[in-house]
Image (tube, grey):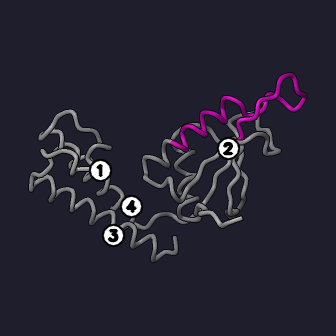
Amino acid sequence: MRPAPSPRVHLFVCANRREGSPLGPGCGDRGEAVYAALKEEVARRGRIADVWVTKTHCLGICPKDGCTVARWPAARPSAIVTEVAAKHEDGLRLLAGALLDGAEPTAIEAELEALEELQKKKVLDLARRLRPDLTAEDIQNPHDFPELGDTDWHYADGVLAGIQSARAALRAARGG
């Protein structure tokens, strides 16, 4: 037995299906949709290492609408929330609570997140001016593409790295 890395937070999404049960049909398709939306948002934010999302069977609470999601470690006021819908706001609310332990992001954190998104777009746009077929994944390995030897592109990529470092420092200072 050996220790394995653990996430900062782990969200469990019920996608259980019940056929003909007096308890109802389960979370089923609604849970599948919430699971997919949360996975997509976690990936978009680049947080797959510290926020895990797992699809589960029954979590013991069968809502009429949406699905049930449990969180580990437990959150305040509850480790289990129900009637979670796949709409973007529910996923963002769950993730904000997971990432910030229920606290609202500071103005600086929110501004840095917005700056990071803008700079990512700028870096990709500059790369595509140099070589139109490049993807966001391609520019993670700029040494594979000689066209990215451009000084303007390197400068923009360096600015992005600085923004990401500042965000990481703020998270670390907050204990997350």
Q: What residue sits right under mark 1 in the picture?
A: 140
Q: Percent from the top left, x then y, of residue 36?
A: 56, 37
Looking at marks 1 and 2 on the same chain, the residue that comes earlier in the sequence is marked by 2
Q: For mark 3, give the secondary structure.
A: helix
Say few, some or many: other residues with alpha carbon within 10 Å of mark 1 (under 14 / 14 to 19 / 20 or more).
Answer: few
**Magenta stretch bounds:** 13-39
Residue at x 80%, y 43% (from the top left corner): 61
Residue at x 28%, y 43% (from the top left corner): 138
Q: What residue sits right under mark 4 in the picture?
A: 110
Q: Closer to us: mark 3 or mark 4? A: 3
Q: Between residues 113 and 104, which one lies in front from this camera angle?
A: 113
Q: What residue sits right under mark 3 in the picture?
A: 166
Mark 1 near mark 2, Cβ–Cβ under 8 Å?
no
Residue projecting furthest to the right: 22
Q: For mark 2, give the secondary structure.
A: strand
Q: CA distance from mark 3 to mark 2?
A: 32 Å
Q: CA distance from mark 1 to mark 2?
A: 31 Å
